[in-house]
Amino acid sequence: MMLATADGELWRVDYSGLANRIEKNAAKITRMLAMPDGIAIAIGYSNGQTILFDTASSMQRVLPGSPDAVHDIAVTQDGKTLAIAHNDNSTYIGPVTSGDATQWRILSLSARSLTFTASGMLIAGSPDGLVWVYTPVTKTWECHDTGTADLTHIALSTSGGTALIFNSEGKIFRLTLPLERTSPQ
């Protein structure tokens, strides 16, 4: 198990319950996300840096990003694509296997919460109450206005056809997702 403390330290807790410090970063950890392989963890920091940490080898790889704090991180179910939302209204989408910035797409998107559908559509909830649905294959967008503000969490139905979006006041909004495209038309 991996833990982050408020002072920016990253810890690994072994099966016996013993905690070992992995590293201390000057920046605070703002988001951690376990990857589908069960081995790697994506870690976002308040200085905008995001790393992919391999828990088996303790190897780290820096991923492209902005100098502003990481709000959220999402990964596709197959573990091949990451989305990283930053405080400067940028969201980076790219392959987990590459730290090469030229392979990553930068979206001008203010997002507090990110999730991917099973087919790879990105759903983003924004502080202004908008829900953005991005289809990477066709590079198309849909925008849905919830009529509220400060969207904080997104949950998908098991079928993947519906998203539930939560705001900071506890309101829940239901969004029927568009048909998922798997290839450009």
Image (spheres, grey):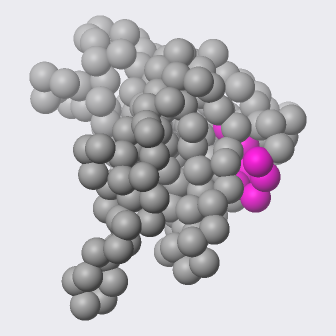
> For this view, does 22 lie left or right of residue 57?
left
Q: Position of residue 89 (x, y in %)?
A: 53, 16
| Residue 7 horizontal side relative to residue 133, left or right | left
User: Quarter of the image holding residue 139?
Assistant: top right
Q: Is residue 4 above or below residue 100?
A: below
Question: What residue is at 57 percent from the left and 38 percent from the top?
Answer: 49
Task: Indicate whether residue 5 is drawn in magenta.
Answer: no
Say which quadrant the N terminus sits in: bottom left
Q: Residues in magenta?
A: 93-99
Q: Is residue 143 visible?
A: no
Q: From the viewer's perspective, is 6 left or right of 131?
A: left
Quarter of the C terminus within the rendering: top right
Q: Nearer the viewer, residue 93 or 144?
A: 93
Kindly identify the residue that appears in the image at 40 percent across and 27 percent down.
Answer: 112
* Residue drawn at (68%, 56%) of the image: 61
- Across and down, in percent, residue 41 comes to 51, 61
